[in-house]
Amino acid sequence: MIFDMDILIWAQRGNEKAINWINDAADRAISIMTYMELLQGARSQKECQHIKTFISEGNFIVFPLTENIGHRALIYIEEYAMSFGVRASDAIVAATAVENHFVLASGNVKHYKPIRELKFKYFRSG
């Protein structure tokens, strides 16, 4: 399962449901886009290190941006950006899941709903 940034943030804040979702996943993965967004949101070197440790100790696969992922993300932007507001980062995360045949877990249904070939699992924090 590929986890979107929201679930990782919930887990880092101690949300038991998010932690259990991650722990119950047979395969844990994230897009390099998600990793970059997490690090970009860090407010200090300590937070940055905490994120790196969380990803490393959680045994997450970090899928790189490949030519196929980039191409598929571009198609998603062309098809869904204007009509559904899909942003580049969401397109890359969705394309990463589709290209690697993983389910994407996220609480952001609106971001991913229009992408028909995406296998999606909805997360509610509460």
Image (cartoon, rainbow, N blue to C red):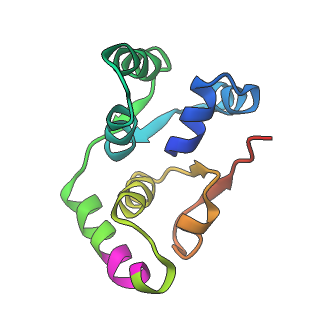
- Residue projecting furthest to the front: 43
- Residue projecting furthest to the right: 126
In this picture, is 74 found above or below 43?
A: below
Q: Nearer the viewer, residue 26 or 46?
A: 46
Image quarter for residue 99?
A: bottom left
In this picture, is 17 found above or below 94?
A: above
Q: Residue at x 47, y 54 (%)?
A: 101
Q: Residue at x 37, y 26 (%)?
A: 43
**Residue 3 visible in the picture:** no
Image quarter for residue 42?
A: top left
**The C terminus - image quarter:** top right
Residue 108 percent coordinates (x, y): 60, 57
- Residue projecting furthest to the left: 67
Q: Residue at x 19, y 59 (%)?
A: 67
Q: Nearer the viewer, residue 120 or 42?
A: 42
Total number of numbered labels? 0
Residue 40 percent coordinates (x, y): 32, 37
Residue 83 percent coordinates (x, y): 47, 86
Residue 38 percent coordinates (x, y): 40, 35
Q: Mainly helix, strand or loop, the magenta region?
A: helix
Relative side of 71 to 26, left or right: left
In this picture, is 5 found above or below 92?
A: above
Relative side of 56 to 5, left or right: left
The residue stretch that appears in magenta: 75-81
